Amino acid sequence: MATKLQRATRIEDRIEELRAEIDGIIDARVARISSESPGVPAGVIRNLLTARAPSCRCAQYIELCGREAKTPD
């Protein structure tokens, strides 16, 4: 049973690392768009970028990257 607990902890750690990485990617995108859109609050831009997949950061990342491959922001 110790192995299962150890594995769950590792997965949880990886999830937290992925969430932090995705937040960084979204923050960078928000900063880029903010510099091109003075006067628009960063929170509004972030909400617009993540609104299509609000359930989790992984879905937000997939949505942003898939859309980026098709057309730039």
Image: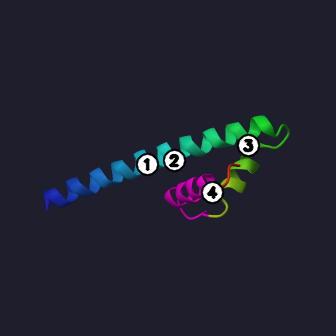
Question: Mark 2 or mark 3, which is nearer the start of the sequence?
Answer: 2
Residue underneath mark 1 = 18
Q: Nearer the viewer, mark 4 or mark 2?
A: 4
Indicate left or right for 43 with 11 as reference: right
User: What residue lies at 62% left-to-right and 52% top-to-bottom?
Assistant: 68
Main SS, magenta residues:
helix
State yes or no: discs 2 and 1 in contact (Cβ < 8 Å).
yes
**How far is mark 3 from mark 1, CA to CA?**
22 Å
Mark 2 crowdedness (10 Å alpha carbons): few <14, some 14-19, many ≥20: some
Q: Hey, what amino acid is under mark 3?
A: Ala
Residue underneath mark 4 = 70
Residue underneath mark 2 = 22
**How far is mark 4 from mark 3, CA to CA?**
24 Å
SS at circle 4 = helix
SS at circle 2 = helix
**How far is mark 1 from mark 4, CA to CA?**
23 Å
SS at circle 1 = helix
Image coords of residue 36 (percent x, y): 79, 37
State yes or no: discs 3 and 2 in contact (Cβ < 8 Å).
no
**How far is mark 3 from mark 2, CA to CA?**
16 Å
Residue 55 within the segment the image draws in magenta: yes
Q: Hey, what amino acid is under mark 4?
A: Lys
User: What residue lies at 75% left-to-right and 39% top-to-bottom?
Assistant: 34
Q: Nearer the viewer, mark 1 or mark 4?
A: 4
Q: Nearer the viewer, residue 16 or 38?
A: 38
User: What residue lies at 43% left-to-right and 48% top-to-bottom?
Assistant: 18
**How far is mark 2 from mark 1, CA to CA?**
6 Å
